[in-house]
Amino acid sequence: MTSRLHRVLFASCAAMAAALVLAQQPPNSSQTTTQAAVQPAQKTAADSKAPDAQANAAAAKQKADEVLLRDARNAGFKPEMIRGNRMFCRTATELGSSFPVRTCYDEEQVKIKIQEYQAERNQMQANHNLGQRID
């Protein structure tokens, strides 16, 4: 039984080694010459626009990230790395309890929570303004 298992393992390892050798060989030379002739013409037009678009996209992403961090901190969340993912956590004491509860949300969930908190704040302000007398 053990020798049969060894033969199967050896055969599968040999097949994997052969596949790796074939994957490392250069492609057919006739395809590379035609692709090489076409690619430079395409790259020159695309390369002039690509850095600007990439820079703009990176700047927009960085700005959105800064806004998210600011809004999350204002809502009481603290960014933390948990299992390789950026999470936003906050510790609060639940109503009617003396035990603090720590809740963590990912980026999409914290955006939703921030919107919910803002809606609650707006509702409280609207209710407060209704109770004031205007002279």
Image (cartoon, helix red, strand yellow):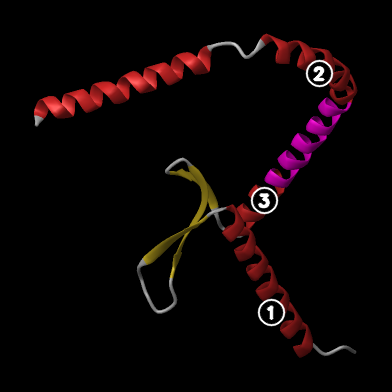
49 shown above or below 71? above
Residue 20, percent from left and from top = 45, 18
Q: Would residue 51 be counted in the magenta stretch?
A: yes
On screen, residue 98 versus residue 106, left or right, reads left
SS at badge 3:
helix
Along the line of sight, which residue is nearer the eye, 32 or 98? 32
Which numbered circle lies on residue 68? 3
Task: Measure how far apart labels 3 and 1 are at the Cα level.
Answer: 23 Å
Depth-wise, is mark 1 or mark 2 nearer the camera? 2
Q: CA distance from mark 3 to mark 2?
A: 40 Å
Instruction: Write down the quadrant of residue 43 in the picture.
Output: top right
Pick whichever of labels 1 and 2 is earlier in the sequence. 2
Whichever of callouts 3 and 1 sits on the residue coming sooner in the sequence is 3
Q: Secondary structure at mark 1?
A: helix
| Disc 1: which residue | 124
Identify the residue at image location x=71%, y=79%: 123
Q: Which mark is residue 39?
A: 2
- Closer-to-camera residue (103/50): 50
Task: Please state the extent of the stretch shown in magenta in the rendering.
Answer: 49-65
Dividing the picture into quadrants, the one containing residue 132 is bottom right
Question: Sequence order check: which comes first, mark 3 or mark 2?
Answer: 2
Give yes or no for residue 19 being in the magenta stretch: no
